Image (cartoon, grey):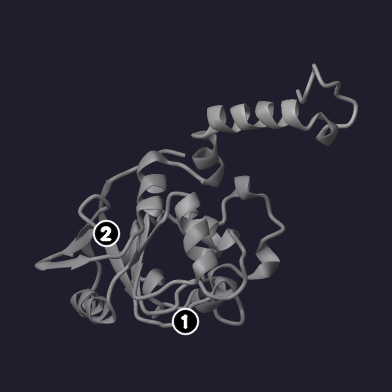
């Protein structure tokens, strides 16, 4: 995964609160391989009617939103089940950042581990951004180092922990973070093996753990 610090792209408004992971990608599509791409299933049941036809009034179905990469929405985005496929659907649809007042905790963790920024802004700033986008999508900038989303004359700060920032900038997930400590882990393992060889059945005191 490639890390990033700054992104310029088209911002689109989705003025709905409480969009959960079951809405982001319905479970019936999750049996398909990731290699096939999940972007076409993003918010499928909100974007399609009962017959499967696009709903023209839905924000992401409007022609002018094609190519949008920054999604601005309302509170509690990504609540519900822990499905990582919800993040895959957003990424495969071209999104690099979601801006909202709050996120489901597991969704936010999955997002960061996959290079998608969950930019948490105040409820007031979210409404200002949504109001600015009411007439249609606009160019925007997301700067991880500055911790701000800029759209037109608005510059809205967002909350991001240092651990989240480090992962996004370096393109790391939890395994990558652990690998930074490989030498310390190996040294601890060797010391433990020497002191308590019985923890590794079959290993002699001289061999320790391998």
The residue located at (50%, 41%) in the rendering is 177
The residues bearing labels 1 and 2 have C-alpha atoms spaced at a distance of: 23 Å
Question: Does the image show residue 3?
Answer: no
Residue sitting nearer the eye, 4 or 151:
4
Going by the image, does 181 lie left or right of 128? right
Q: Residue furthest left?
A: 153
Instruction: For label 1, count other residues whose C-alpha is less than 10 Å away and answer few (under 14), some (14-19) or many (20+).
Output: some
| Left or right of 13, for residue 135 | left
Q: Nearer the viewer, residue 177 or 184?
A: 184
Q: Circle 2: is it few (<14), some (14-19), or many (20+) Cα within 10 Å?
A: many
Q: Residue at x 21, y 60 (%)?
A: 148
Q: Give the image quarter of residue 182.
A: top right
Residue 94 locus on image (x, y percent): 41, 54
Q: Closest to the observer: 136 or 71?
A: 71
Disc 1 marks which residue?
18
Quadrant including the C terminus: top right
Which residue appears farthest toward the top when viewing the image? 206
Q: Position of residue 45 (x, y in %)?
A: 56, 76
Residue 158 visible in image: yes
Q: Where 51 sits versus 99, above or below?
A: below
Label 2 residue SS: strand
Residue 113 against residue 121 in the figure, above or below: above
Specify which label sits upstream in the sequence, 1 or 2: 2
């Amino acid at each position: 995964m490639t890390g990033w610090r700054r992104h310029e792209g088209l911002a689109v408004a989705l003025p709905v609160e409480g969009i959960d992971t079951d809405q982001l990608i319905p479970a019936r599509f999750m049996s398909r391989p990731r290699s096939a791409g999940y972007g076409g299933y993003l918010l499928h049941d909100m974007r399609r009617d009962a017959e499967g036809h696009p709903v023209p009034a839905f924000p992401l179905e409007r022609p002018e939103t094609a190519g949008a990469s920054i999604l601005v929405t309302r509170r509690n985005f990504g609540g519900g089940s822990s499905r990582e496929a919800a993040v895959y659907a957003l990424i495969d649809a071209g999104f690099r950042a979601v801006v909202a007042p709050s996120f489901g905790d597991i969704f936010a963790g999955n997002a960061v581990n996959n290079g998608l920024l969950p930019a948490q802004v105040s409820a007031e700033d979210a409404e200002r951004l949504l109001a600015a986008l009411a007439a249609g999508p606009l160019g925007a900038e997301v700067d991880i180092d500055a911790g701000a989303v800029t759209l037109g004359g608005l510059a809205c700060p967002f909350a991001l922990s240092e651990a989240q920032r480090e992962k996004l900038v370096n393109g790391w997930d939890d395994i990558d973070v652990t690998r930074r400590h490989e030498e310390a882990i190996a040294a601890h393992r060797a010391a433990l093996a020497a002191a308590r060889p019985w923890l590794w059945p079959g290993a002699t005191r001289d061999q320790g753990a391998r």
